[in-house]
Image (cartoon, helix red, strand yellow):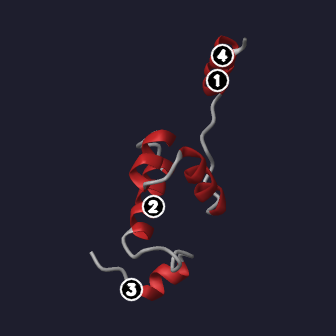
Amino acid sequence: MRIPEEALALAGLDDQPAAEGPRRLLALELFREGRVSLGRAAELAGLSVEEFMEFAAHRQVPLHYTPEDLEENRGTAARLKP
Protein backbone atom coordinates (compact mmCIF):
# COMPACT_ATOMS: atom_id res chain seq x y z
CA MET A 1 0.00 0.00 0.00
CA ARG A 2 1.31 3.44 -0.88
CA ILE A 3 0.56 6.36 1.41
CA PRO A 4 1.03 9.84 -0.04
CA GLU A 5 3.93 11.73 1.55
CA GLU A 6 1.56 14.60 2.32
CA ALA A 7 -0.65 12.29 4.40
CA LEU A 8 2.37 11.04 6.37
CA ALA A 9 3.48 14.62 6.96
CA LEU A 10 0.01 15.59 8.20
CA ALA A 11 0.09 12.61 10.58
CA GLY A 12 3.51 13.73 11.85
CA LEU A 13 5.17 10.60 10.48
CA ASP A 14 7.20 12.02 7.61
CA ASP A 15 10.45 11.43 9.53
CA GLN A 16 9.94 7.63 9.54
CA PRO A 17 10.41 4.99 6.85
CA ALA A 18 7.33 4.86 4.60
CA ALA A 19 6.14 1.45 5.83
CA GLU A 20 6.57 2.23 9.54
CA GLY A 21 4.13 5.15 9.83
CA PRO A 22 1.02 3.33 8.60
CA ARG A 23 1.98 0.23 10.58
CA ARG A 24 2.20 2.29 13.78
CA LEU A 25 -1.04 4.14 13.10
CA LEU A 26 -2.89 0.88 12.50
CA ALA A 27 -1.55 -0.61 15.73
CA LEU A 28 -2.52 2.56 17.58
CA GLU A 29 -6.05 2.45 16.20
CA LEU A 30 -6.45 -1.22 17.12
CA PHE A 31 -5.28 -0.38 20.64
CA ARG A 32 -7.54 2.68 20.87
CA GLU A 33 -10.54 0.53 19.91
CA GLY A 34 -9.59 -2.03 22.58
CA ARG A 35 -9.07 -4.76 20.00
CA VAL A 36 -5.46 -5.46 21.10
CA SER A 37 -3.57 -5.06 24.36
CA LEU A 38 -0.84 -2.51 24.93
CA GLY A 39 1.86 -5.16 24.54
CA ARG A 40 0.34 -6.56 21.35
CA ALA A 41 -0.07 -3.08 19.88
CA ALA A 42 3.57 -2.31 20.61
CA GLU A 43 4.57 -5.57 18.94
CA LEU A 44 2.44 -4.83 15.87
CA ALA A 45 3.91 -1.32 15.69
CA GLY A 46 7.47 -2.66 15.89
CA LEU A 47 8.13 -0.67 19.08
CA SER A 48 8.93 -1.44 22.69
CA VAL A 49 6.04 -1.00 25.12
CA GLU A 50 7.64 2.20 26.40
CA GLU A 51 8.07 3.58 22.88
CA PHE A 52 4.47 2.72 22.02
CA MET A 53 3.22 4.41 25.19
CA GLU A 54 5.07 7.56 24.15
CA PHE A 55 3.72 7.27 20.60
CA ALA A 56 0.17 6.94 21.99
CA ALA A 57 0.66 9.86 24.37
CA HIS A 58 1.84 12.14 21.57
CA ARG A 59 -1.39 11.32 19.74
CA GLN A 60 -3.50 11.76 22.88
CA VAL A 61 -4.65 8.14 23.01
CA PRO A 62 -5.34 7.01 26.59
CA LEU A 63 -3.65 3.86 27.82
CA HIS A 64 -6.80 2.16 29.23
CA TYR A 65 -5.11 1.59 32.57
CA THR A 66 -7.79 -0.05 34.71
CA PRO A 67 -7.97 -0.68 38.46
CA GLU A 68 -7.42 -4.36 37.65
CA ASP A 69 -4.20 -3.46 35.82
CA LEU A 70 -3.07 -1.52 38.89
CA GLU A 71 -3.74 -4.46 41.20
CA GLU A 72 -1.91 -6.82 38.86
CA ASN A 73 1.09 -4.49 38.74
CA ARG A 74 1.09 -4.14 42.54
CA GLY A 75 1.14 -7.92 42.87
CA THR A 76 4.00 -8.20 40.42
CA ALA A 77 5.95 -5.48 42.24
CA ALA A 78 5.38 -7.25 45.59
CA ARG A 79 6.64 -10.55 44.18
CA LEU A 80 9.76 -8.88 42.75
CA LYS A 81 10.62 -7.04 45.96
CA PRO A 82 13.73 -8.44 47.69
Q: Dot 3: within a 10 Å radius of its alpha carbon, few (fewer than 14), some, or many (20 or more) residues?
A: few
What residue did someone put label 4 on? 80
At label 4, the amino acid type is Leu
The correct choice, above or below, for 20 with respect to 18 in the image is above
Where in the figure is residue 49, as x and y percent of width and height? 55, 45
CB atoms of marks 4 and 2 within 8 Å: no
CB atoms of marks 2 and 3 within 8 Å: no
Q: Which mark is residue 54?
A: none
The correct choice, above or below, for 36 with respect to 27 in the image is above
**Residue sitting at 42 percent across and 51 percent down?**
30
**Residue sitting at 43 percent across and 74 percent down?**
17
Question: In the image, 2: left or right of 39?
Answer: left
CB atoms of marks 1 and 2 within 8 Å: no
What residue did someone put label 2 on? 24
* Mark 3–mark 4 distance (CA, rounded to whole Å): 48 Å
* Mark 4–mark 2 distance (CA, rounded to whole Å): 32 Å
Give whichever of discs 4 and 1 has the lower sequence position: 1
